[in-house]
Amino acid sequence: MSLKATYTLLAPFYDLVVRHALDNARRASLAQLPREGGATVFINGIGTGLDIPYLPPGHRYVGLDLTRSMLERARCRVSGADLVITQGDSLKLPFKDACFNHAALHLILAVVPEPTQALAETARVVTRGGLVLVLDKFLRPGQRAPLRRLLNPIARRIATRLDVVFEEVLARVPGLALESDQPALAGGWFRIIRLRKK
């Protein structure tokens, strides 16, 4: 089943599964965006819009997702935010180079089939000096995690990958520098990562 088809089926239940568990992590990640307004911020993989309540005011936002049914739910949350929602592919962004000041990727890198490409595409559309904020579940380098690896072939077909090692992804995107990496929940499986575009 394709990623789009899977998330079309999951859209009605998505919020029930992830909303409350990750609200604090979303808030903490997005709190790293500058407080002064006027920036243009890209939300790559906006999904049902669970990030929207935590977006700092004063910025202009563009949210992208692959699945129309997820975006329909996101549109219901926009309510006053300066936010444009668009359908598109995280692996081939429909934007020019360096057209955003900052970006956020929440729960998208472990979902897409090519996380390195998704991160590289996000880096491409961010200006030099901009932040790239990541919230997702990652294995640590050398971490065995036998159960996660065993379940990965099934999980990746249903909804998400369980075998992504962020350090390996980042090493293949040389335009980004790691500034912060903090555990978010589940014993550090979920992490809040701040990157800076060189």
Image (cartoon, helix red, strand yellow):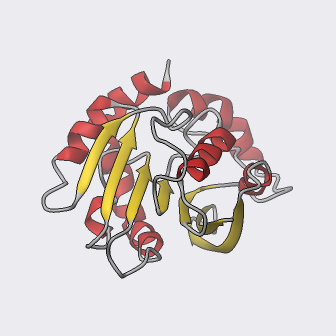
Q: Is residue 192 left or right of residue 39?
A: right
Find residue 56 and report its image quarter.
Answer: bottom left
User: What residue is rendered at 40% in x and 22% in y?
Assistant: 5
> Looking at the image, is 37 positioned above or below residue 130?
below
How many numbered marks have been drawn onto this rendered protein structure?
0
Residue farthest toward the right in the current orientation of the protein: 142
The image position of residue 8, as x and y in percent, is: 34, 28
Q: From the viewer's perspective, is residue 122 above or below residue 82?
A: above
Image location of residue 122, percent across then percent down: 56, 49
Q: Viewer-proximal residue, 97 or 46?
A: 97
Q: Nearer the viewer, residue 103 or 98?
A: 98
Query: Residue at the spot x=35%, y=48% of the render?
Result: 63
Task: Examine the rendered structure and indicate whether residue 67 appears above or below residue 178.
Answer: above
Q: Position of residue 196 (x, y in %)?
A: 63, 68
Q: Nearer the viewer, residue 16 or 93?
A: 93
Q: Residue furthest top?
A: 1
**Which image quarter is the C terminus in?**
bottom right
Q: Position of residue 143 (x, y in %)?
A: 81, 56
Residue at the far bottom in the pictured view: 35
The structure residue drawn at horizontal position 25% and vertical position 46%, both measured from the top left corner, is 74
